[in-house]
Amino acid sequence: MYENYIFDLYGTLIDIHTDEHKPKLWNTMARIYDAYGAEYDPEEMEKIFFEMDREARKKLAMENGSDYPEIQYEPLFARLLLEAEKTHPVTAPLPEKRSVEELAASPWTALMANVFRIESRRRFRLFPGVLKTLIQLKKEGKRVFLLSNAQAVFTRPELEQTGLVPLFDDIYLSSDYGIMKPDPRFLTALMEKHGLKKENTLMTGDDFHADAGIALENGVHAAILNTHGNTEEVMEKYKKDALKRHKVRDTSMIHLVMKDPFLPNLPKGPEA
């Protein structure tokens, strides 16, 4: 029987669709920054933001040796204000912290990050059966964890909004650790901290590369939920490819969960 359940978040527990390139998002961000004296054309602002993102990830990868580095967005939003080429005087109260590091840690930057997130969202809701399943697992004495590729600055508010926080024994978000799935060290850190044994642990997600990949690299079973509406034939192909990529012969290492609602149909153990 599985005693430890580790869940991905987006596409697994939360049904979400975001578009970080939609014009309305960057129009809103440019107007807000303009109120604080930083003038941007929306398209220019978008370009600069993602250039900063790429540069930061490249630098972090050189520092931590990961093929899957995860940065924090807060310094990017701070730099957009502090490093704007075109500015004008304003009467609006500016954040007191004026270095990138100080401003990145301020409530102002957290607000900017959450405006960015909210404007990017097109859909945001829990999948059916999520709360009921997690509550039941806790009643059965199981340990429940979250392991997500996510920005803590806006993911923690989303977890609070959905009521999920109290249901986890611990929450691991990639921006807090500098690496993301499928870097095996991300899952290893969680398992070592809590003394989890691989034989009674299940990693549940929706992505064969990130979720199944990190599980297989740690010798942990994976359950992949078909939340994207693929055919069984396609899911079996993805499963076969993942096993081959990670050189795993035991096909039982990946469980396919095809039936909606997905979480109530999770396997109970390796033999289930």
Image: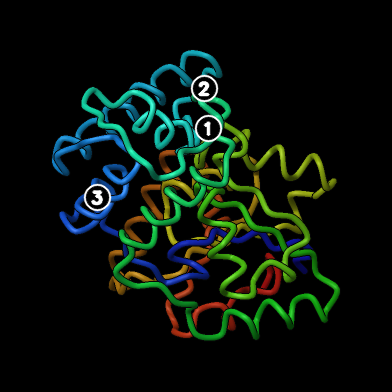
Q: Secondary structure at mark 3?
A: helix
Q: Quadrant of residue 188?
A: top right
Residue type, numbered disc 3: Arg
Q: Position of residue 212 (x, y in %)?
A: 50, 51
Instruction: Check whether the beta carbons of the residues at disc 2 and disc 1 lie within 8 A of each other.
Output: yes
Q: Position of residue 5 (x, y in %)?
A: 70, 63
Q: Residue at x 22, y 36 (%)?
A: 39
Mark 1, residues whose alpha carbon is within 10 Å: few (<14), some, or many (≥20)? many
Q: Which residue is mark 1?
A: 103
In whole angstroms, how far apart are the C-alphas of marks 3 and 1?
19 Å
* Quadrant of image for the N terminus: bottom right
Q: Residue at x 46, y 38 (%)?
A: 94
Residue type, numbered disc 1: Leu
Return the mark for residue 31: 3
Q: Position of residue 193 (x, y in %)?
A: 81, 41
Which one is in front, 197 or 243? Answer: 197
Above or below residue 96? Residue 59 is above
